[in-house]
Amino acid sequence: MALVSTRMAQQPTSSALRALALEYKGILEEPVEGFRVKLVKEENLFEWEVAIFGPPDTLYQGGYFKAHLKFPPDYPYSPPTVRFLTKVWHPNVYENGDLCISILHPPGDDPQSGELPCERWNPTQNVRTILLSVISLLNEPNTFSPANVDASVMYRRWRDSKGKDKEYENIIRKQVTVSRVEAEKDGVVVPLTLEDYCVKPKEKPASDSVDLADFYDDDYDLDDDDDDDGSDYGAGDDGEDSGNGES
Amino acid sequence: MKVKIKKWTGVAVWKWTANDDSCGICRMPFEACCPDCRIPGDDCPLVWGQCSHPFHIHCIMKWLSSQQMAAAQLCPMCRQGWRFR
């Protein structure tokens, strides 16, 4: 593997793998509303593809935005990066699609950015919190440190004119229209009403999805069963497995 | 009826007394150990911050030691300054 971070070079990636496997499984079982998640390549948990549905009653309504999440080998001690594959005209998205958001920045670097440590990455952040931040940022750009200055200026004109200056709006709506073609290609129906958007699909992950046993080969019963008696860790017959042994 | 016990096997269970089930950093159950350890329990104990948030000691130490700036030594859960309890 070519990716080696300096500080934690000697650390095996098994802990990152474990954290990602847990998160991936969790998200498949209980999806974040407004998102679809899958792995870019089935055998690689360090790259996820997410599809973001534009939230109803916003400019992004009906939109279908794809992005790649790339996780570092020392995740969750370092943040993943998020890059949009779909064209997104947004104050906090760079020309190349990279998303700029404070919770994806490590606390240490770039002290001049004006971002407080408490707004930055920390290891209890996870894909769920990232995705929710992304969706709220879509509709409420941060114009204090824009990645796309033109978009930021245009957005402020739109906002300050209370929508009378339609240049920003028109660009977004056009991108939404284009993105719908992609959704159709993927066979995805983008929810348009608040009701459809919020309904959490109860369906279990398709059987052809990744077999997590490949990644997470332990005996813990991580399924959050309906009867939550909270007493099942390690209670099985397979007793002595600490849950941390590599297999 | 008289019963004569010929042999018995003691069984004990243990559990950390924490408000949460799993470590917010490594996401493993507290009763398991951090990903760098193999044996849970005293070899991979929990620590609490003054804010009362528990973590595996190895997980929180790894995070704190990666933060050079004192201002960034925050509890990952509540983002208050981290102090051991």
Image: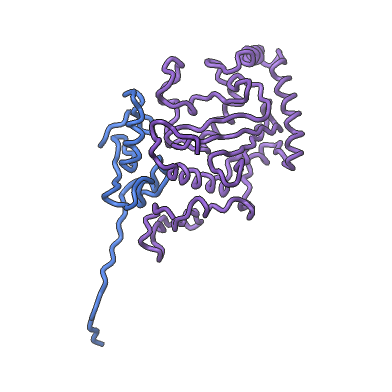
Chain colours: A purple, B blue
Which residue is situated farthest in the front direction here?
A2
For the residue pair A236 and A164, the one nearer the viewer reads as: A236
Relative height, residue B6 to residue A83 (above, below): below
Left or right, A208 with respect to A221, comes to: right
| Residue A149 x, y percent position in the rendering | 60, 13
Tell me what residue is drawn at x 30 percent, y 36 percent: B49
Left or right, A101 with respect to A151, comes to: left
Relative height, residue A147 to residue B21 (above, below): above
Q: How many marks?
A: 0
Relative height, residue A53 to residue A222 (above, below): above
| Residue A105 x, y percent position in the rendering | 47, 26
Left or right, A245 with respect to A71, comes to: left
Left or right, A57 with respect to A10, comes to: right
| Residue B79 x, y percent position in the rendering | 38, 30
For the residue pair A9 and A63, the one nearer the viewer reads as: A9
Tell me what residue is drawn at x 41 percent, y 55 percent: A230
For the residue pair A99 and A215, the one nearer the viewer reads as: A215
Q: Quadrant of residue A36?
A: top right
Relative height, residue A13 to residue B83 (above, below): below
| Residue A22 x, y percent position in the rendering | 49, 47
For the residue pair A191 and B26, the one nearer the viewer reads as: B26
Q: Which part of the image, by quadrant, shows the C terminus of chain A? A: bottom left
